[in-house]
Amino acid sequence: MLILGLDQSITRTGWALYRFPGDERHMTCGSFSCSDEADADAKCERFAREIKALIGPKEGRPDFVCWERAKRQISAYPKKPSADLLGLGGNDVWTVNADQLLLPEIQGIVRAATVFYRVPHESVSPATWRAAIYGKGGGKLSRIDAKARAKEYCRTLGIKFTGDDQAEAACIARWAATCSLHFRQLLARAAA
């Protein structure tokens, strides 16, 4: 069974193809970026084309796709003080990361592609897969520590990657192979 693991983002999406059962060292990892597109619509359209290239072709189509679930809430951050042009008191202005607003939309693109191409799939929260792969406390790591742990995990298993996005995608693929109930059911049906 060929598993596609995705650590999706507009900035840089990591992907990993894992033939299970099989040696993790033979995982193929890659990534793509949509950040050079002009606006949000163009970024999402580019993302859709990249996902179609990974999931769409009949030859080499994954048997299972697993991706990191986007948060349901959007975080706001205090904006850096600037000139108080509107009389709002420069320090009271909050903003969101615009790319973060696109995460639910690109997650929908992945889900739609798996449904359209009839590929079994699952999304998993970062805390869930990290706790299962890294062990106790792994689900509570900071973003920076979690990415460092993903790279360490991949080095230990001999998985070739470049960048933390690919390392996290490989970890998500490993989680799918070893922990996903949906994937286990798929394996059982295939064996029957």
Image (cartoon, rainbow, N blue to C red):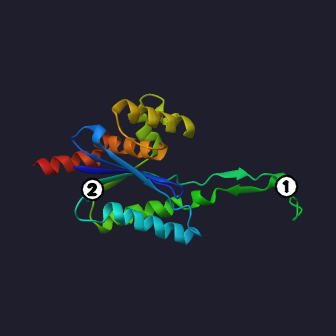
The amino acid at mark 2 is Pro
Find residue 11 and report its horizontal and vertical position in percent: 54, 56
Left or right of 170? Residue 91 is right
The amino acid at mark 1 is Gly
- Viewer-side label of 1, 2: 2
User: What kind of element bears circle 2?
Assistant: loop
* Residue at 51% across, 62% down: 34
Neighbor class of circle 1 (other Cα within 10 Å; few <14, some 14-19, many 20+) is: some
> Which circle marks residue 139 in the picture?
none
Left or right of 27? Residue 9 is right
Res. 88 image quadrant: bottom right
* Residue at 14% across, 51% down: 190
- Label 1, on which residue? 90
Along the line of sight, the residue nearer the viewer: 19 or 64: 19
Q: Is residue 22 above or below residue 190?
A: above
- Label 2, on which residue? 62
* Residue at 50% across, 60% down: 104
Left or right of 159? Residue 87 is right
Residue farthest to the top, as pictured: 136
Neighbor class of circle 2 (other Cα within 10 Å; few <14, some 14-19, many 20+) is: many
Q: Is residue 163 above or below residue 105?
A: above
Label 1 close to label 2 by CB (< 8 Å): no
Q: Which one is earlier in the sequence, the residue at label 1 or at label 2? A: 2
Along the line of sight, the residue nearer the viewer: 120 or 158: 158
Find residue 152 and report its horizontal and vertical position in percent: 44, 32
Find residue 140 and report its horizontal and vertical position in percent: 52, 35
